[in-house]
Amino acid sequence: MQRVLQTILENIHAFQKIIFSDYLPNASYKKIVLRLVQGKEHVYIQAEQFTQKQVFHVNFDCNQAQEYVHKVVPFYKQVVLFLCGQTISFHILPNGKIKKHIQNNTCENVVPSLHNRNKTYLLQEGENIPALRDLGVFTADNKIVKSMYDKYKQINKFVEMVDETLKKEDLTHITMLDFGCGKSYLTFILYYYFTVKRNISVHIIGYDIKRDVVEHCNKVAQTYGYKNLRFEVSDVSKDTLSEEHIDMVVSLHACNTATDYALHYAIMKKVPYIFSVPCCQHEINESIQKGGDFDIFLKHGLFKERFSALLTDAVRAEILKAMGYAVDVIEFVDLAHSPKNVMLRAKKVHASNTTMLLPIKELLGKYGVQQTLLQLLEKENI
């Protein structure tokens, strides 16, 4: 084993990857992968440690990595070093002898920032984020559960979109409404983001129509010690909503026209920031008729459904623009993770221009459909 250890230590500054596999019975992990990772200020070594169902990550400086290698080498019969130009493999035979094999390879980047998860994500592994533990994304000791890594990326993507919008703003306090909040894991995570990551005083109200869900969320908020986070039972299409000043409206997968009521509230309140991921756009699909330039999409049920969903969100985006918002239409997550993957991210930037609504009305008229957000604004004489 000394030959293996010596080879690793000689290349501790220059390897691309080291894989420890074919574990012995007393090994703590079934496989370990070491990589060089480029941090913001320095290069460090990351150990990816695999159990049967989970993976854990630990970061080391060079000295710590050498100590780590000393500890783990004796527990693996197969060690492969990927160097710039060479791959060196060691295999411990049953008789205790070591078989060494060297193969030439291409020289790739020594420090693949692709694997730098700590640099990539706002919510980093190891942080004390109660909602991520309860969601099953983090283990009890705040390590990422391997099977939940896609969910971890999705949550981070959303928080990064919020951060990208707000990071240039000099905010000391923010009040947010979450429409159709459901079990509210993202609401809890946003609370954490504002208070811990941005050091902003935050007040969040979550609306949901289900009383049992609201009661559960209020208990969770109390357990977490989130004093300025509360949930209320509300039918957003009928009930009176908050009259206080609101800085941000979030509507994530509010079903069908509930999204329109959330957007209408934000428009009428001149809420500066909107983050909306629409869901279940049935309204137009149920009433659309032939009569426009895109009748070809209405000949088949699947095309009709998708066309109706795109038309719904396109109309919403154009209405927001007419109401003075700068709008980004963003792919929230990959299609592999969720079919409801369109986010409307909007920021109030100027006064309304109601003449921009005329082409929207003309387009919808061709297809004989009504659209709830547009109808709500018409009731306000807009």
Image (tube, rainbow, N blue to C red):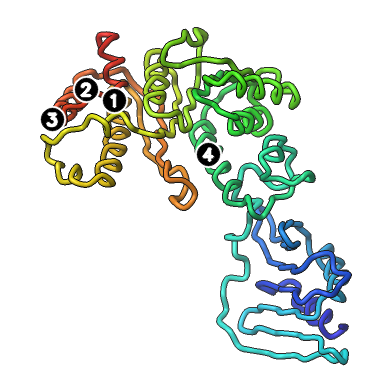
Q: Is residue 47 visible?
A: no
Location of mark 1 (residue):
319
SS assignment at label 2: helix
Quarter of the image for residue 285 reads top left
Residue plotted at (69% across, 23% down): 221
Classed neighbour count for the residue bearing mark 2: other residues with Cα under 10 Å, few (<14), some (14–19), many (≥20) = some
SS assignment at label 1: helix
Depth check, front residue: 259 or 195:
259
Classed neighbour count for the residue bearing mark 1: other residues with Cα under 10 Å, few (<14), some (14–19), many (≥20) = many
N-terminal label among 1 and 2: 1
N-terminal label among 4 and 2: 4
The percent coordinates of residue 55 (x first, y second) are: 71, 58
Location of mark 3 (residue):
366
Kindly report the distance in space between the C-alpha atoms of the residues bearing marks 3 and 1. Answer: 17 Å
Quadrant location, the N terminus: bottom right
Report the side of 136 relative to 377 (left or right).
right
- Mark 1 in CB contact with mark 4 (< 8 angstroms): no
Residue plotted at (76% across, 73% down): 12
Q: Is residue 79 visible?
A: yes
Identify residue type, mark 2: Leu
SS assignment at label 3: helix
Circle number at residue 357:
2
